[in-house]
Image: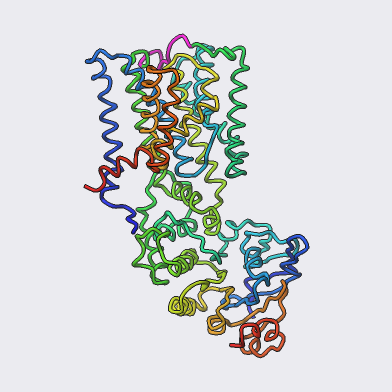
Amino acid sequence: MSRPTTAASTGVRWSVPLVLLVLLAAVPAVANAADMGFAISLVTRVMIYAIAALSLDLILGYGAMVSFGHAAFLGIGAYAVGIASAHDEWNAVVTFPIAIVAAGAFALLTGAISLRTRGVYFIMITLAFGQMAYFTASSLSDYGGDDGLTMWGRSEVFGATPFEDDTAFYYVVLACLAGCFLFARAVVGSRFGRVIAGVRENRLRMQAVGFNPYAYQLVAYAIAGMMAGLAGALLANHAEFVSPSYMSWQRSGELIIMVVLGGMGTLHGAVLGAIAYLTLEEVLSHWTEHWRVIFGPLLILVVLYARGGLGSLLRRSGGDG
Amino acid sequence: MAEPILVLEDLRKAYGALTVTDNLSMTVQAGSIHALIGPNGAGKTTLIGQVSGQLAPDAGRIRFDGHDVTGLPMYARCRRGLARSFQITTILPGFTVLENVAVAAQAHDGHSFRFLRPAAAEARLNEAAMTALATVGLADRAALRAGSLSHGEKRQLEIAIALVMKPKLLLLDEPMAGTGHEESERLVATLEALRGSLTILLVEHDMDAVFALADRISVLVYGRVIAEGPPDEIRADPEVRSAYLGEEGAP
């Protein structure tokens, strides 16, 4: 029997994100008290990737668009902020919109072509566009080329420097993550989100009731690109450095792993996936440089035995009460 | 007589050497129930595909409601009031039954580039969907996942999806395929109740249903209309009997 929206699943819908928000909000205080200041930086990075994974879940989980070039949007957002800083433009009120619009424009352009294909071809063509962005960034010799571009500080807001303090920046990133999450959740429940999910379920049926799937998928792709662009702008500020490696296909693969690990099509799953992936990477890579040997089998176990990802494990343990 | 709602002129469609639609011309009168019958492989589903816009004809023209729609994609024809059901059940299995119908209502209620308001709470869409579900007798299944319905219920759901769009012309491709006797009767009654309020082009193998419903029948064999007329005439036509009805025994 199917139970579309039971009380239990509605509970998980809000309880998991709320618990995550509270835990994340408490991190700086706990880290400072425990004299583990590095944790603030680590979790900041986790949250930035969570925004990127969230944006990917929007198109991959809800729209079944397996974008294998998602890191390009992240990198373009980062480069927008980095290149602006090289020209002495530090104001986030200027650079962040540029980063978001640039990533969105790249998504619109490449999506307009990629979305004419489906399945494996879509994966291949998004991968190709991602690599194009990667090699373009590598060849920007004025901006560091292969070596990347060091920024001499973080973005400002009309001369003020709210990003310089690690704890303040942490909360800026947390606010961005929460904002993106709420926006993404509104989108998937909206008329637009319903069309996107409908096309995932059955493209022919959606055409037969009067929708042009291409237009909706393209807009979804651009929205996801813009959100990843924001993550890129934050990433540049966090590392005070931008590098072509942000756009590498390995990075795109990592984002897909985060979404699958956490559970596709749930939004909070993407956040859980980013936390799990980057924390495991941090812990295991301290232990051994061959950490992927351990991580690989773990991932296989999740895919085999927890189809819905980590999010579904939470639902199973908490849903029957 | 009023202008026909659907005019097909010299339609041709071939797959390699196999001509599936062979210079076919026919008209469907507004408000009628027009049945299309013929043996397997006669090209009925291919013809429905061309009329709905899923397939492009190699040659010929399709006029719908006074306009040439030959070059329009399926979604654009649908917006002009041309709805269809599929021979092979085509629904959104992960959506609830209600959502399946509500999303079709949404397609014909303003635009869908709305990003923030929850669609599930839009009463107008849900009410229209419930009305359509009640028409086909699925109201009590509204909250179920569509994939969990029985085969017959999925067929009914397809009809509800088509009805909620309030089409001018409804193309039904074997709506009774694989349904039980009782479900078929229910469907015949549903379609009978719709008579006059819209035009129906019905492809069906169930001859009882066809002869009970149709105002006019076209017989398709090897991509060509070999006979067309009211049910009594078709039943008596010797060519039809030998080409088609004879195979299954005259009704």
Give the residue at x 45% y 20%: A290
Depth check: give the residue in front, A176 or B198.
A176
Q: Is residue A246 visible?
A: yes
Magenta-colored segment: predominant secondary structure:
loop
Number of numbered discs visible in the structure rendering: 0
Q: Quadrant of the N terminus of chain A?
A: bottom left
Would you say residue A156 sits in the magenta stretch? yes
Up-down relation of residue A77 to residue A109 (above or below): above
> Residue B82, image x and y in percent?
57, 65
Give the residue at x 26% y 46%: A319
Q: Is residue A102 visible?
A: no
What residue span does the magenta drawing correspond to? A151-162
Up-down relation of residue B112 to residue A29 (above or below): below
Would you say residue A153 sits in the magenta stretch? yes
> Residue B10, image x and y in percent?
75, 69
Q: Farthest residue toward the right?
A: B17
Q: Is residue A136 left or right of residue A57?
A: right
Up-down relation of residue A320 to residue A144 (above or below): below
> Residue B2, image x and y in percent?
63, 78
Up-down relation of residue A285 to residue B53 (above or below): above
Depth check: give the residue in front, A101 or A21.
A21
User: Which image quadrant is residue B151 in?
Assistant: bottom left
> Residue A210, image x and y in percent?
54, 57
Depth check: give the residue in front, A273 or A33.
A273
Q: Is residue A104 left or right of residue B153?
A: right
Give the residue at x 47% y 21%: A94
